[in-house]
Image (cartoon, helix red, strand yellow):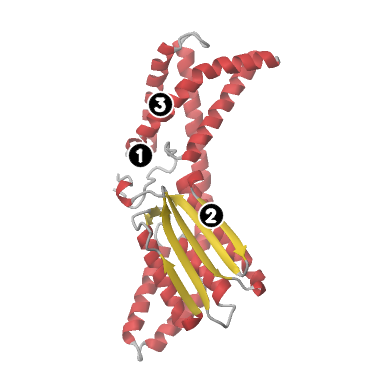
Amino acid sequence: MNPNSINQNLMLPNFRNTGILLRILLIVNLLCLLAAFVKSGSSWEGLMREWAEISAVSQPLLLASLLVFALLNDWLRSFSYFMAATLLVLVEALLAFAMHGLVAFLVYGSLFRYGVFSLLTLAFLLWYFSLRSRALSPALTEARLQALQARIRPHFLFNTINAVLSLIRSDPVRAETALEDLADLFRVLMADNRKLTTLSKEVELCREYLDLEKLRLGERLQVEWHIDKMPGDAMIPPLVLQPLLENAVYHGIEPSSSPGIISIHIYRRRSEIHAVLRNPYSPGTAGRHEGNKMALENIRERLSLHFDAEAGLKAELIGNIFQVHITFPYIQEMSRHVR
């Protein structure tokens, strides 16, 4: 049982995701065009005629398949990837047989050829999404995630420990709380962060991190939370917001001797979650932008891995304020799939 991830089988495409559906439609239509080209030879008119005939057969099957796969999406994720792929092949074979009865002999003239084309198309799609997942998940994303975790800078740890030591005699309760926050932060950093967590847990981690930074920055660090409309049960990849706040402190608060405000605004709009983070921008910190870009690209990739085209990240400079706006679909904790 894995209660911390809505995407138990990353290699299996999510047939309810808009980006996945668009990719499938595009790939299948390109395959149909390729088949029409092979059959027609070099004639443009023949190509259009063959493509129209193939599409007349393939499009109803394609739409029916996507509908059935979307209905079975959660059920399929209760199995291993091999078993889920086998079930998809069986379902596609049944659909091809049923659709053949409706459009028999329009193009292929036999159930065998009709079914083979459908199953080959499905096999190609499974191979494509498996290849895409492998490219995004274990190698590239794991390496960049480790690099992102390493960005908890040594001087942050050093300064935090020094701040705690200075509090042990004067304020032992606050020192103990700070050590607990530091332990929580590093426990999350060392965990398997391919699993999703709730938005409320991510926000709590962010609070602990900012409390630690306030130990050394004092009144220079001002934080504004606007989360009264935040659905705490929404699922999000861990370490999405915390690295952005670390960037905000490093790029926006540390370079200035005057107080600066970091604002966090998280809310739900229809079926989407929006997280807007703002911090001051100092023109003299241009040399620090490279690390900032690495964190942004890492977060953008992990959002894409879990939510595909339904998530996005936009970073922009508005006057002397740097703003990061994240959007991702609202998927509740109670609706996540449990193995």
Foreground mark, 2 or 1?
2
Residue extending furthest bottom?
A: 170
Tell me which amino acid carries mark 1.
Answer: Arg
Q: CA distance from mark 2 to mark 3?
A: 36 Å
Q: Is residue 268 above or below residue 244?
A: above
Residue toward you, 103 or 156:
103
**60 and 94: which is toward the camera:** 60
The image quadrant that residue 35 belongs to is top right
Q: Mark 3 sits on what residue?
A: 89
Mark 2 vs mark 3: in front: 2
**Residue 319 visible in rendering:** yes
The residue indicated by pointer 1 is 77
Can you give x and y, in whole percent of width and height, for residue 97 in the image? 40, 16
**Three-letter amino acid code at disc 3?**
Val
For the C terminus, the quadrant is top left
Q: Disc 2 designates what residue? A: 313
Query: Separation of disc 2 and disc 1 at Cα?
Result: 27 Å
